Image: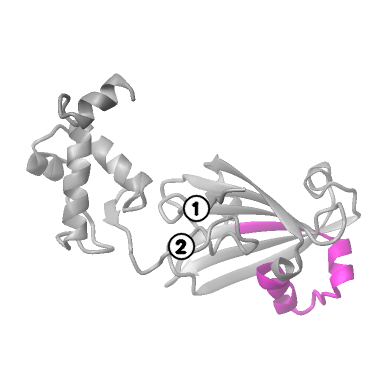
Amino acid sequence: MTEKLKQLVNGEKKIPRCVEVYDKLFEMIKDGEFIQDSRLPTEPELAKAMGVSRTTLRQALAFLQEDGIIKNVHGKGNFVMKSGIKLEKGLEVLEHPVYSSVTEKIDEVEFEFKIEPSSDYTSKVLERKTPVVIFADRWYKSEGKTVAYTLSIIPVETISEEGIDLSDKNQLLNYLEKKVYEKAKHSSIKINFSEAGNVSAMKYVVSKSERFYLLAETIHVKNKYPVLYNKHYIPMENGYILIDRKAK
């Protein structure tokens, strides 16, 4: 046991002030003084009420954000997270990662696609050369608000092998949303952070803070080549990344 930890356990060293503020705010949220989806008082008001500096308060708020208890909405303040949406599955489950990562209830998916010649970039992410690719855009919405965005790159071979009729948009959408995950043998997801989500989404502003989790996903069904490549942009204010690891 480290000396600092011994001091804390034995009561010889005071708990950091920001931790005390964290505990106090957490209790207030748990006791219903700040109800779910409500906005917390402003930082100056909270700092005064807690008797601490704004620097100490911000440290406590940062910990509450990390733990998924509150979220910061750029230009609006800090809000208590909704408890009704519980992420029971993490990214370890081979399912659509947007539904495992967004804390808002998704009730609508807006969908568009276009056919383009392949490029060096598409050959790289699809790990093969293909004459034509499909770029598919999906905007995920909750009560009219866009809460996530996905760009999919699909080789024409996947369209042919799956017998997808591109004149019927719903066939392609159903494949991207459900069928590919039902058929997949494995997928890999690389997690990054991005500030380009709004630029990629183009049609809508997905995050006012412009801070995103970027989940770059390749999906394999039966051979060494991916059947498609996804870039999922999850706004940090609406996202929560969970990976439930188990012992060997």
- The part of the chain drawn in magenta is 150-179
Q: Quadrant of the N terminus?
A: top left
Q: How is the image coloured?
A: one colour
Q: Is residue 144 left or right of residue 11?
A: right
Residue occupying the point 33% across, 65% down = 83
Mark 1 burial class by Cα count in 10 Å: few <14, some 14-19, many 20+: some
> In the image, is residue 128 part of the stretch drawn in magenta?
no
**Residue 108 horizontal/vertical position (percent):** 53, 74
**Residue 206 horizontal/vertical position (percent):** 48, 56
Residue bearing the label numbered 1: 242
Residue bearing the label numbered 2: 87
Residue occupying the point 56% across, 44% down = 196
Q: Earlier in the sequence, mark 1 or mark 2?
A: 2
> Would you identify the image quadrant in which residue 109 lies?
bottom right
Residue occupying the point 59% across, 44% down = 191
Q: Is residue 19 above or below residue 31?
A: above
Q: Amino acid at mark 1?
A: Leu
Q: Amino acid at mark 2?
A: Leu
